[in-house]
């Protein structure tokens, strides 16, 4: 045999050499110890199996021809018990059948013939151990990948659950916010209506006058396809269109417009400016404030306070001017006599293009002549016919013009009882309009 060569393959690898010839074992021990390996030896397959029971072994080199248990059977046992241990066969004769048995049964990595070249056998062992190390690293990485994938899957499931829970929470919070916002808006409009009722008491208007103006103005705005915010601003402005008159003396409040002259007429013409000034500090009412300022402007430019004409007048002011005049004519606030609804309509149509915007006049005619909004008016019922769950189609107003309940209020048993008690104490029946759902065929 050639001299051993000093090649370092794996500093901690343990080799087990099995051969029934002591001199072969000694030669292998010297060769592989010189190469930096830990070397164990056994003189039979049985002894080799005992060592494997006690010691972790990276690679086994076994002779083929041994008594009691040949190399093929020994390596087959090793493969069965310790499949991760690399196996090599050492044979001293050319027996192809025996080598095939070792390959098939023991699944050996390589076979080495006697006599061997030290350099060749060391390289075979080094390459085998490197391959084993790569396989172990591959198995470790695959196991790590599987574990990390499982952890990632669990994390994803946890994240999905957290996202779902957070989404539900946000949805609940959003719904609560929307409900609260809707309630605030409803309360805001109700407050405006109450304020409007208080203004009517001071302005000597017929009870419900402002609500009639506001309802007509809103219908015209809808007919002209204005957006929801503009329509809301117009509705609120109409409810408060007399707020600038709140400081007027009784003599001025009770006089028709055609009888006002001099200082009284000048004071009257200033009420739109005062109304706008009263509302301007509230940002939510600035749109309505601009409408109130322009309510006495005329389409031909001869109005007050700014003398603007045509489309330069805010559309809400053009609508409010017509809606307010329609009911003021009937109430006697513009001329000394009370004009009928039909007469008021004719006067407005006659002033189209001069006092009023022609487009607004067209929308007004479609409403008063076509019955627009009839469905929204609901059905009038007696208080004894009310049942919980009914929805008011109109504001519930007393005979004195005080608003008791706002439109869209959902009646419950307690509120129905209060309405009935109010009628009993006042001695007057209320005009109660509710929405009746359409029956499906």
Image: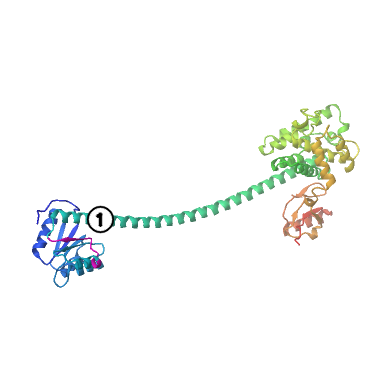
Q: Nearer the viewer, residue 213 or 276?
A: 213
Read off the residue under disc 1: 131
Residue in the picture at 69% in, 34% down:
280
Query: Residue 75: percent from the left, percent from the top?
Result: 21, 66
Give the farthest residue toward the right.
337
Q: Which residues are magenta?
A: 104-114
Task: Answer with the quarter of the image where residue 17 lies.
Answer: bottom left
Question: In the displayed structure, would residue 65 be above or below residue 202?
Answer: below
Query: Residue 371: percent from the left, percent from the top?
Result: 83, 48
Image quarter in which the C terminus is found: bottom right
Image quarter in which the N terminus is found: bottom left
Would residue 378 be found to the left or right of residue 55 on screen? right
Residue in the picture at 13% in, 58% down:
116
Give the farthest residue toward the bottom.
68
Can the viewer see residue 12?
no
User: What colour scheme governs how the chains and residues are painted in the rendered image of this protein?
Assistant: rainbow
Query: Residue 275: percent from the left, percent from the top?
Result: 74, 34
């Amino acid at each position: 045999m050639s001299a051993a060569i000093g090649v370092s393959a794996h500093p901690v690898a343990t080799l087990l050499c099995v051969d029934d010839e002591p001199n072969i074992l000694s030669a292998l021990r010297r060769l592989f110890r010189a190469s930096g390996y830990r070397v164990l030896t056994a003189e039979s397959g049985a002894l080799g199996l005992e060592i494997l029971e006690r010691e972790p072994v990276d690679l086994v080199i076994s002779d083929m021809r041994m008594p009691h248990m040949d190399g093929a059977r020994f390596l087959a046992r090793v493969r069965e018990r310790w499949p991760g241990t690399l196996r090599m066969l050492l044979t001293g004769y050319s027996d192809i059948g025996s080598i095939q048995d070792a390959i098939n049964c023991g699944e050996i990595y390589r076979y080495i013939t006697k006599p061997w070249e030290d350099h060749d056998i060391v390289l075979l062992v080094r390459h085998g151990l490197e391959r084993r190390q790569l396989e172990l690293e591959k198995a470790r990485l695959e196991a790590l990948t599987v574990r990390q994938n499982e952890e990632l899957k669990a994390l994803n499931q946890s994240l999905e659950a957290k996202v779902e829970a957070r989404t539900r929470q946000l949805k609940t919070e959003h719904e609560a916010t929307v409900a609260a916002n809707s309630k605030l808006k409803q309360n805001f409009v109700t407050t405006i209506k109450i304020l409007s009722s208080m203004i009517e008491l001071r302005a000597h208007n017929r009870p419900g006058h402002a609500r009639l103006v506001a309802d007509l103005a809103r219908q015209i705005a809808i007919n002209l396809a204005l957006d929801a915010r503009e329509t809301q601003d117009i509705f609120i402005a109409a409810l408060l269109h007399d707020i600038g008159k709140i400081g007027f003396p009784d003599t001025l409040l009770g006089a028709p417009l055609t009888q006002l002259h001099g200082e009284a007429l000048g004071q009257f013409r200033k009420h739109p400016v005062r109304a706008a000034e009263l509302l301007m500090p509230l940002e939510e009412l600035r749109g309505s404030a601009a409408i109130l300022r322009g309510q006495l402007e005329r389409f031909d430019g001869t109005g007050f306070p700014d003398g603007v004409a045509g489309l330069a007048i805010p559309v809400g002011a053009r609508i409010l001017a017509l809606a307010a005049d329609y009911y003021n004519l009937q109430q006697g606030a513009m001329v000394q006599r009370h004009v009928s609804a039909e007469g008021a309509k004719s006067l407005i149509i006659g002033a189209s293009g001069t006092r009023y915007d022609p487009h607004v006049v067209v929308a007004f005619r479609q409403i008063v002549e076509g019955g627009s909004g009839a469905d929204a008016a609901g059905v009038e019922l007696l208080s004894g016919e009310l049942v919980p769950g009914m929805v008011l189609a109109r504001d519930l107003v007393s005979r004195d013009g005080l608003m008791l309940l706002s439109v869209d209020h959902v009646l419950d048993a307690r509120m129905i009882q209060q309405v009935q008690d109010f009628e009993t104490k006042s001695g007057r029946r209320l005009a109660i309009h509710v929405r009746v759902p359409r029956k499906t065929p």
